[in-house]
Image: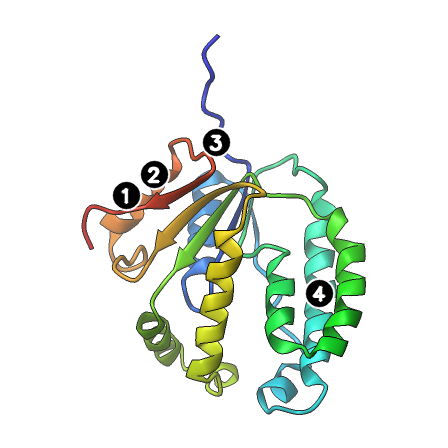
Amino acid sequence: MADFFQPPRYIAVEGPIRVGKSTLARILAEKMHARLLLEPEANPHLEAFYAGQPGAAFRVQMYFLYQRYQQLAPLGPRPHDPVVADYLFEKDKLFACINLNDSELGVYNTYYNLLQPNIGTPDLVIYLQASMDVLRKRLGRRNLTSERNLSAAYLEEVIAAYKHFFFHYSQSDLLVVDTSEIDFVARNEDLQELLRRLSEPIQGTQYFLPLGG
């Protein structure tokens, strides 16, 4: 009996800051008539973190960990209705490894390891990439107060961490999309080409290579 393509019901979009995660997640949720989950952004400790106050990184990370857990845990192992999220739960640990010192990370890992088994795995993860120059231009266009103090070195570290994480990622099907030369917001043809790719089977790790940019 032939295997029929079953579109993914739970999609997570990931990638570094200003790569377009939330924008694509909104588009996909609308197309799929799916529930949209946007990662929590409000954090009372962020200002202190960006100002470099001692201990602020740990407070930021623990606050985000619990917020993300509260949002994703109710989905269970497999959501009944279609869901599109603009983050993976694992991204929390990715940033913890960047921002926390060894002793803080030890405490963090105790809680992360307790919570993580209760989080379901997406059917498909879309990993959005972009070059350093492109991300910095997008940061400049947004010009958010909370992001003005992000150094080039920190952004490079985040980009490298994402590349390393997804190089080893195998928990679900993965589509890697380099957005440096495409713009699925400003150019409808780029969006339609990406949506066409997502209407086809994706098995293992695959790469979206648009015909034009």
Horizontal relation, residue 3 to residue 118: left or right:
left
Image quarter of the C terminus: bottom left
- Which label was assigned to residue 65? 4
Q: Are marks 2 and 1 in contact (CB under 8 Å)?
A: yes
Residue 209 at what x, y percent from top left?
28, 47
> Measured along the vertical axis of the image, is residue 105 above or below residue 55?
above
Helix, strand, or loop for circle 1?
helix
Label pair 3/4, CB-CB below 8 angstroms: no
Residue beneath disc 3: 7
Name the residue located 37 percent from the left edge and 71 percent from the top edge.
135
Residue 172 lies in what quarter of the image? top right
The picture places residue 127, in percent across and down from the top left corner, at 45, 53
Instruction: Name which residue type carries label 1.
Output: Glu
Task: Select label 1 or label 4 by which is in front.
Answer: 4
Residue 140 visible in this rendered orientation of the protein:
yes
Estimate the spatial distance between the alpha carbons at disc 3 and disc 4, rounded to whole Å.
Answer: 29 Å
What's the CA distance linking mark 2 and mark 4? 32 Å
The residue closer to the viewer here, 130 or 10, is 130
The residue labelled by disc 2 is 197
- Res. 19 image quadrant: bottom left
